[in-house]
Image (cartoon, rainbow, N blue to C red):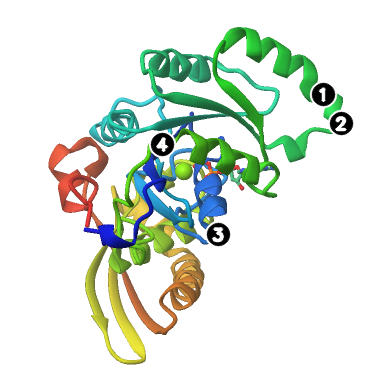
Amino acid sequence: MADMGQVNSEHKCGYVTILGRPNVGKSTLLNRLMDQKLSIISRKPQTTRVHMLGIKNQKEYQAIYIDTPGIQQEYDSPLHKHMNAEAKNSLEGVNVILFMIESLKWTKPDERIFNLISKYKQKKILLINKIDRNKTKSDLLPFLKSLSERVDGMDILPVSAKNGTNIDTLEELVSAALPVSPPLFEEEYVTNRNKKFFASEYIREKLINRLSDEIPYRLAVTIDEFEEETDIIKIKATIWVEGDGQKNIVIGKNGSILKTAGEAARKDMEILYEKKVYLNTWVKVKKNWTQIDSSLELFGLVNNDV
Ligand SMILES: Nc1nc2c(ncn2[C@@H]2O[C@H](COP(=O)(O)OP(=O)(O)O)[C@@H](O)[C@H]2O)c(=O)[nH]1
Ligand SMILES: [Mg+2]
């Protein structure tokens, strides 16, 4: 519990969920808001699998942002059902809903998420992301007009999560909407995830970025050993795939993919942990794991808050 004695009576605190279809830029926004890399990002949809908290402590408020997996309906495996549930569950009990779309696009999946959140009474802000891609400012005006008719009553804010445009305005809107409350997390907490979690996510990110489209969905990473010493952390990780073909692809010619991905992940870990990292990776096959409910638990995809 936070020390109530130090909290002023006007202090605000609450949960803010970031929802949207895959690939609109939710994880990029979380990292931007937190000024650090918490969520992994890729050009491929469905990179984020479990929700991630980013706890932002300001003088007057504490905002607890929730990055969610994108809500999608194309796939129907236990893994995808779980990812949708992670996103939908985040709606219960939050104070602010950030609904993110991409500039100049309003797609069927956007419409479905809009219909879902319409049932909730909390403060909602529609974020139009990636405005850095617009050629001119006037491109946005007709789009803004049609949206304001469609999403009656929501604040609408064009942003660029990547460049930081209008993020300060977003934070003002968020803090204004938070209820008066003491902080729910002590100040040193920045996230709900532990060091081990980041090790596995960084490895997954570096592999996703080096592999063609289908395989990333078939990958899971477990951390089998995490030994922290004074100036080094020794990590043993297993990369799980669904078949031998995938195993060969992940390893790459002469081990090239596994080697460069491991190197890149290790460098990111050293920045995060501020220590040297020794990383050892193995690739193993677990047939059709995305289709098997019990694998989700094995791979830390359920009940994984720390
Ligand atoms: N141009 C541009 N690209 C962005 C912006 N925000 C995110 N992206 C890119 O969009 C892709 C998906 O981003 P990510 O944050 O993983 O999306 P998520 O699936 O919604 O979490 C990545 O390639 C990002 O670099 C933005 O404001 N502008
Ligand atoms: Mg994401």
Mark 4 or 2: the one toward you: 4
Task: Point out the frontmost of discs 1 and 4.
Answer: 4
Q: CA distance from mark 3 to mark 1?
A: 29 Å
- From this view, report whether residue 110 is shown above or below residue 235: above
Q: Which residue is mark 3?
A: 35
Residue underneath mark 1: 139
- Circle number at residue 17: 4
Q: Which residue occupies the foreground of this view, 298 or 121?
A: 121
Seen at 31% across and 92% down, the residue is 230
Answer with mark 3 or mark 4, whichever residue precedes in sequence. 4
The earlier-in-sequence mark between 4 and 2 is 4
Amino acid carrying mark 3 in the image = Asp
Which residue is denoted by mark 2 in the rendering?
136
Q: Classify the position of the C terminus by image quarter.
A: bottom left
Marked residue nearer the N-terminal end (3 or 1): 3
Q: Kindly identify the residue that appears in the image at 26 percent across and 57 percent down.
A: 4
SS at badge 2 = loop
As drawn, which residue projects farthest toward the bottom?
Answer: 230
Q: Mark 3 vs ligand 1: CB under 8 Å?
A: no
Numbered disc in front, either 3 or 1: 3
Picture layout, residue 97 above or below residue 254? above
